[in-house]
Amino acid sequence: MILGVVAFLWFAVAPAAAATGTEPLIEQSIESIRANPPAQLSGDTIASPMLLPEMYDQRAFQSLWGNAAMVEALLEAIRHSEDDGLNPQDYHLAVLDRLKAAGADDAQGQCRCSI
């Protein structure tokens, strides 16, 4: 929970990334999450189907993951969340690692990685 709040605040105050062309795909995915609870992405249930859409609304559906250094910092924080008594799998670490390893060569891949 604490990590989720920190991530939300980090993304909420971070400057929006430049438009990448994935915004319509991200918006479509976010609207599907809103319309079809409980929402799932990559086989995992999204724990906060209200928070995720709000973050993307505030950023005009621009990717939250445009900065590689921020991505790696967040993944490291999740990996080390056990040090704070949290379970990294509660933050979908395996899915995030799999998506990062698969890369994002096209708009669909970028959209999957963004959400």
Image (spheres, rainbow, N blue to C red):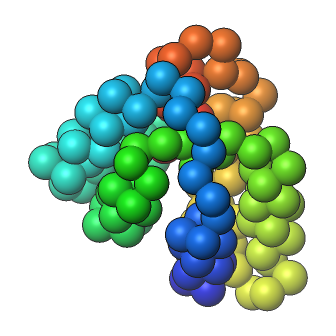
Q: Is residue 95 above or below residue 22?
A: below
Is 43 situated left or right of 27 in this image?
right
Q: Position of residue 115 (x, y in %)?
A: 48, 43
Give me the residue at 30% from left, 44% from top.
30
Q: Position of residue 110 (x, y in %)?
A: 57, 26
Q: Is residue 79 visible?
A: no
Q: Is residue 105 above or below residue 3?
A: above
Q: Position of residue 45 (x, y in %)?
A: 39, 53
Q: How many marks?
A: 0
Give me the residue at 38% from left, 48% from top.
60
Task: Identify the image quadrant of residue 92.
Answer: bottom right
Q: Is residue 99 visible?
A: yes
Task: Identify the image quadrant of residue 76.
Answer: bottom right
In the foreground, 111 or 37: 111
Task: Identify the image quadrant of residue 14.
Answer: bottom right
Residue lying farthest left? 35
Is 42 situated left or right of 74 in this image?
left
Give me the residue at 49% from left, 42% from top.
62
**Quarter holding the N terminus?**
bottom right
Give me the residue at 80% from left, 68% from top.
77
